[in-house]
C-alpha cells in the first residue's frame, strides 16, 4: 500500500462563484491537508481524504472573507473544517477519473462527484515521487446550509447558488 500526502506548496484549492450573475469571484483555502492511499499503480483502489481550515479562506477582500466566515455562510467558529472522504475513484479513460465521496461543509454531509484528470508522475530534484491531479466539479452551496442571499434593486441575484470547485494537486509518495 502506497501512501501519498499533499504537497501544499505546489497545490491550490480554489472555488468560483458568480457575482451579480456576470462575473466570477475566485476564492481559495490556504490551509489544507490530504492523503491518498493506493496499492494499484493506476490508483483505481485509491482512498482519498481531504480537509481545509475554513478560517484560511481568501478572496482577496478582507470584508468579503469576514462575511464568508460568518453565520451567513461557513460559520467558521462552529464549523472550523470542511472535509471530503472518497467512496470511489473510477477510471474513465487513460488519464480521466470520476471521484465520488462525501463532502462535509458546515456540519452537513452530502455525496458529490468530481472529475479528475491525472497529470502523471515525476521525480523532483530531491528524489520525491510526485503525482499530479486536476480536480473539478460543482456543488450547490444551499445544499450545505450556505443560504445567504440578496438581490439588487433590479431584482438580480447577488451570489449564485452554484459553486465551481477547481483543485490543482500534487501528491508526494511517502
Image: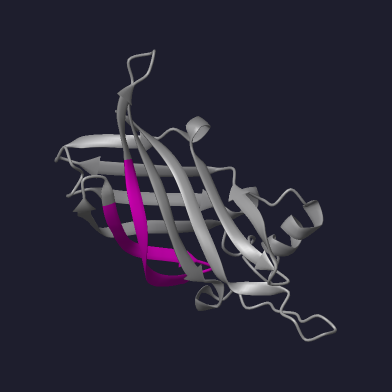
Residue 139 percent across, percent down from the top left: 48, 69
Residue 150 percent across, percent down from the top left: 75, 80
Residue 23 percent across, percent down from the top left: 69, 63
Magenta: main secondary structure equals strand
**Looking at the image, can residue 156 be seen?**
yes
Residue 28 percent across, percent down from the top left: 60, 49
Does the segment drawn in magenta span residue 128? no
Does the segment drawn in magenta span residue 100? yes
In the depicted structure, whether residue 86 falls above or below residue 144 = above
30, 20: nearer the viewer? 20
Tell me: 113 left or right of 145.
left
Which quadrant, please, contains the N terminus? top left
Tell me: 151 left or right of 18.
right
In the depicted structure, whether residue 44 falls above or below residue 69 = above
Instruction: Give the residue displayed 82% in from the left and 85% down from the top.
Output: 154
What number of labels is visible? 0
Range of magenta residues? 97-118
**What colouring method underlies this structural image?**
one colour
Which quadrant, please, contains the C terminus? top left
160, 82: nearer the viewer? 160
Instruction: Give the residue displayed 37% in from the left and 60% down from the top.
Output: 114
Amino acid at each position: 500500500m502506497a501512501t501519498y500526502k499533499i504537497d501544499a506548496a505546489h497545490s491550490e484549492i480554489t472555488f468560483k462563484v458568480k457575482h451579480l450573475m456576470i462575473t466570477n469571484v475566485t476564492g481559495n483555502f490556504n490551509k489544507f491537508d490530504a492523503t491518498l492511499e493506493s496499492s494499484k499503480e493506476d490508483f483505481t483502489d485509491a482512498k482519498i481524504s481531504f480537509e481545509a481550515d475554513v478560517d484560511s479562506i481568501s478572496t482577496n477582500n478582507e470584508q468579503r472573507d469576514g462575511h464568508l466566515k460568518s453565520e451567513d455562510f461557513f460559520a467558521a467558529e462552529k464549523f472550523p473544517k470542511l472535509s471530503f472522504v472518497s467512496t470511489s475513484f473510477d477510471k474513465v479513460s487513460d488519464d480521466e477519473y470520476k471521484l465520488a465521496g462525501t463532502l462535509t461543509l458546515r456540519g452537513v454531509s452530502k455525496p458529490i462527484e468530481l472529475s479528475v484528470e491525472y497529470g502523471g508522475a515525476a521525480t523532483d530534484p530531491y528524489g520525491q515521487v510526485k503525482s499530479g491531479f486536476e480536480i473539478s466539479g460543482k456543488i450547490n452551496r444551499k445544499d450545505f446550509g450556505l443560504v445567504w442571499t440578496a438581490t439588487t434593486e433590479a431584482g438580480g441575484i447577488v451570489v449564485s447558488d452554484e459553486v465551481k470547485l477547481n483543485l490543482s494537486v500534487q501528491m508526494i509518495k511517502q
